[in-house]
Image: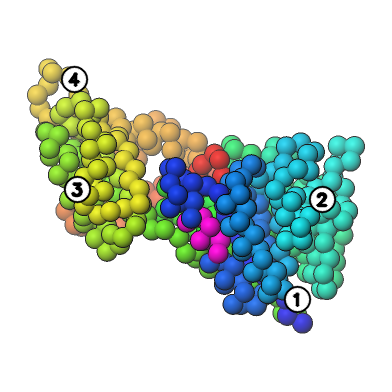
Amino acid sequence: MTISFIHCSDLHLGYNQFGLEERFLDFGRTFSHIVNDAVAREVDYFLIAGDFFNKRTINSRTLLQAIDGLERLKGAGIEVIAIEGNHDKAPYEDRDSWMHFLGERGYIHLLKPTIRDGKLVLDSNNVLCFPKIRFVGLGYFGSMTERRLKELSELLNPSEDFTVLLLHSAADRLLHLGGVPFEAFAGLEGVVDYAAMGHVHERYEIDDWIYNPGAPECWDLGEAHKEKGYYHVVISNGEKTVEHIPSIRRPICDIELDLSGTFTLEQVYDKCLQAVLEGCAESDDGVIIRLVIYGQVTFNPLTIDQARLAEEIHNAVSPVHVEIINQTIQEGYDFDSFDAKLDRAVLEERVLKGLASSYFSSRFEIDDRFLDEIVHAARSIKALAISNDEQGMTDAVQALAKELLKRSPLPADESQGGAAGENL
Ligand SMILES: [Mn+2]
């Protein structure tokens, strides 16, 4: 017997990002594409691991987008199993959420935790059995997640049937933002065959049984480079095959431009426009442009007219939206030293040390002397890059990585950290 499902999460329907109608439609379209694929692949189940809606209160057009997709799934005989995320969760014990409405109308099976006397209880609200497969749906617990997982591991018995857990939580990442360490899942390994996660907007997988697909659209433009999509899972004779499928979403053109050595505003606008024309040449139709400008300029950075710059960019490439992030700083006020080169080197060192300190100090066991070494290494790597010395650069990066690993209190694969972002 073969069972198959699509697992997606964080669709955030109804999000009119930047106040744009086009972005509202984008989130709907991305969901629609996944539905089409589920129907084409003739899967048995469609899993939504939370944040189906961007907000608890949605407008009627968002509901129409949702129902349009859900109706097509229903028409194809695909059962939809969903949990609530932090974005679409009903407050407290209130059952009056739109997810609840969709459940009542038979569009989805909404699975929710039952808490009795402060403890998790497994019942028909959160365990749903079909032939050869069962779904345990819990939703979002925030800071209670670790405790609830422990309770679940005591309650959930092993089963002959394939067991899927739906959970809206960050596993082993975002630990400072309510994520739970991997150890919290340890008691479920072997009992849960597939943990269908949501919440983190970037794809990650742990040990062949914890899967997070990533939000299919970019809830934040900073997600542009992250891997995002949904899973197609096929279970045949108890063995699962998992494929991650990238979602279809609006392209984002992400440009970082160093404006160091720019003396006039006109130069700024020219350089920006040129960078945009070069960076977005291939996909100039309907992209979102994120332009980060940085470096030392000789004038007050606040005089850069972002509205004018955005308008010029709009006229040149007709994007859907332009986001400009101005990180330029005015060249040092140290008028005693007119040696611009020296000034820049000193400043670079100071900035690099600050960055190295804030980034590495929390992850590695390093002292001030080694921070200086990192700064030195970073500057020589930059010099090698400028002189196109690829081999030298590779060697220097490898040497630095080796030194860092020696000082890492964590296993190598954990030290990469997780996705950033607070409102996933
Ligand atoms: Mn989310």
| Numbered disc 3: secondary structure | helix
Residue furthest out toward the bottom = 1
Q: Say which residue appears at 64% left-offset and 69% top-offset.
A: 72
Quarter of the image that includes the C terminus? top right
Which residue is disc 3 drawn over?
273
Label disc, if present, on residue 238 of the rendered structure = 1
Which residue is disc 2 drawn over?
152
Amino acid found under the numbered disc labelled 2: Leu
| Numbered disc 4: secondary structure | loop
Residue 284 locus on image (x, y percent) = 28, 59
Q: Determine contact: label 2, label 3, CB under 8 Å.
A: no
For marks 4 and 2 on the same chain, the one whose residue lies earlier in the sequence: 2
Quadrant of res 241: bottom right
Answer above or below: position of 13 versus 368.
below
Q: Which portion, as a residue range, is magenta?
A: 26-32
| Numbered disc 2: secondary structure | helix
Residue 385 locus on image (x, y percent) = 22, 52
Q: How many marks?
A: 4
Image side of residue 142 versus residue 55, left or right: right
For marks 3 and 4 on the same chain, the one whose residue lies earlier in the sequence: 3
Q: Nearer the viewer, residue 413 or 323?
A: 323
Label disc, if present, on residue 333 of the rendered structure = 4
Q: Nearer the viewer, residue 221 or 330?
A: 221
Disc 4/disc 2 C-alpha distance (Å): 60 Å
Disc 1/disc 3 C-alpha distance (Å): 56 Å
Amino acid found under the numbered disc labelled 4: Tyr
Was residue 257 drawn as part of the magenta stretch in this picture?
A: no
Disc 1/disc 2 C-alpha distance (Å): 22 Å
For marks 1 and 2 on the same chain, the one whose residue lies earlier in the sequence: 2
| Numbered disc 1: secondary structure | loop
For marks 1 and 3 on the same chain, the one whose residue lies earlier in the sequence: 1
Disc 3/disc 4 C-alpha distance (Å): 29 Å
